[in-house]
Image (tube, grey):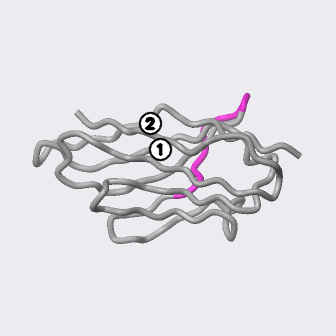
Amino acid sequence: QVQLVESGGGLVQAGGSLRLSCAASGSISSLNTMGWYRQAPGTQRELVATITSGGDTNYADSVKGRFTISRVNSKNTVYLQMNSLKPEDTGVYYCNVDGLRDVFRYFAVWGQGTLVTVSS
């Protein structure tokens, strides 16, 4: 099995910064796309940013220029650096990872979520 452990959420004032981390562990053979999604109260989960194994990134328009996604493959970890935070960035942030485990078994897993609260 593959597990994800997220960290780095918290309370920050508008204009501040936070860095989220998500570490994957288990019988991982390879990791493909790693990403961050968020869900605000009363809304659907939405994509924030993704990064492929080759380093290609994709961002939601609302976070472009403020958030940076990166990964360290040797640590099976993905990061989300969030700068110039706004109250509308508040929500639970979820990590999502897909890849292969036990050599050839495909998997896709979600983290437990970490709460980010941005005060005005």
Identify residue for label 2. 111
Residue 103 rendering spot, x and y as whole percentages: 10, 48
Q: Considering the numbered disc 1 on the image, is that residue within a helix, a strand or a loop?
A: strand
Residue 87 rendering spot, x and y as whole percentages: 81, 46
Asked if residue 9 is positioned above or below residue 57 in the image, the reply reads: above
Residue at 81% x, 58% y is 15
In which quarter of the view is residue 71 placed? bottom left
Residue numbers of the magenta segment = 41-49
Q: Is residue 98 left or right of residue 91?
A: left
In which quarter of the view is residue 43 placed? top right
Residue farthest to the top, as pictured: 42
Residue 31 rendering spot, x and y as whole percentages: 28, 54
Residue at 47% x, 41% y is 6
Q: Is residue 63 left or right of residue 31?
A: right
Residue at 76% x, 62% y is 84
In which quarter of the view is residue 106 placed? top left
Mark 1 or mark 2: which comes first in sequence?
Answer: 1
Q: Is residue 90 left or right of residue 1?
A: right
Quick check: marks 1 and 2 in contact, CB under 8 Å?
A: yes
Q: Considering the numbered disc 2 on the image, is that residue within a helix, a strand or a loop?
A: loop
Identify residue for label 1. 95
Q: Nearer the viewer, residue 73 or 108?
A: 73
Residue 70 rendering spot, x and y as whole percentages: 47, 64
Residue at 76% x, 57% y is 16
Residue type pointed to by label 2: Gly
- Distance, label 1 to label 2, CA atoms, is 5 Å
